[in-house]
Image (cartoon, rainbow, N blue to C red):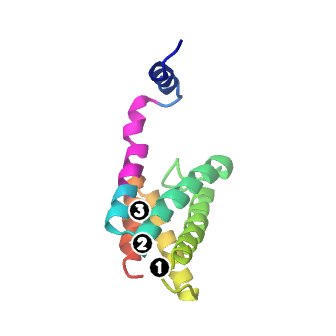
Amino acid sequence: FVSHQTTFHTTFHTLSCPSTEALGGPFIYTVVLLIATTFFWRSPVSAVAIAQMAAGDGVADLAGRRWGQKKWFFSKDKSYAGSAAFVGAATVTSLALVAWLNLAPVNMDLAATLLFISVVCSLVELLPLGDDNWTVPIAGGLLAYSL
């Protein structure tokens, strides 16, 4: 007989990341989602901030690990491939969320604005300004405030 608590405890401690990491990225990610949905429910601010963080930063990490041999001269951890993937994924996801939730008229101006926001957020992600799980959605949300 093995209790669920014992199984969870054993599983949690056998993960490859340190337990302190749970208070880093995943915790910040959850707080950002909570703030975005609580204060900006059904607004372009929330949709764009979440898309920049989730799709942009997430896909940048995957692409950077897979195709990121060529690094930026000022950052040994960030690659051209990751940055390009960030911009592409963040732009498409932002546009898709705004359209799906009917938050703004979908046209070329919106697409260009979201592309601009994604480029700026990818630059914010490159800079050592703190945890990008905070800085990227804040930048995206502030820039999307005008939509």
Q: Do labels 2 and 1 touch, CB within 8 Å?
A: yes
Between residue 79 and residue 25, name the one nearer to us. Answer: 25
- Viewer-side label of 1, 3: 1
Q: Indicate yes or no whether the magenta region holds residue 40.
A: no
Rounded to the nearest whole Å, what is the CA distance between mark 2 and mark 1?
Answer: 7 Å
Work out whether residue 34 can be spotted. Answer: yes
Majority SS type along the magenta span: helix
Between residue 50 and residue 102, name the one nearer to us. Answer: 102
Q: Which quadrant does the C terminus fall into? A: bottom left
Rounded to the nearest whole Å, what is the CA distance between mark 2 and mark 3?
Answer: 16 Å
| Residue located at (38% from left, 82% from top) | 146
Closer to the chain start, of discs 1 and 3, is 1
Q: Please give the range of residues in magenta.
A: 18-32
Return the x and y of residue 64 as percentages of the image width and height: 61, 51
| Residue located at (48% from left, 25% from top) | 8
Return the x and y of residue 110 as percentages of the image width and height: 52, 83
Q: Which residue is mark 3?
A: 137
Q: Which residue is mark 2?
A: 42
Q: Amino acid at mark 3?
A: Pro
Return the x and y of residue 95 as percentages of the image width and height: 56, 74
Residue at disc 1, secondary structure: loop
| Residue located at (56% from left, 84% from top) | 106
Closer to the chain start, of discs 2 and 1, is 2
Q: Indicate yes or no whether the magenta region holds residue 29.
A: yes
Rounded to the nearest whole Å, what is the CA distance between mark 1 and mark 3?
Answer: 18 Å
Q: Which residue is mark 1?
A: 103
| Residue located at (38% from left, 67% from top) | 139
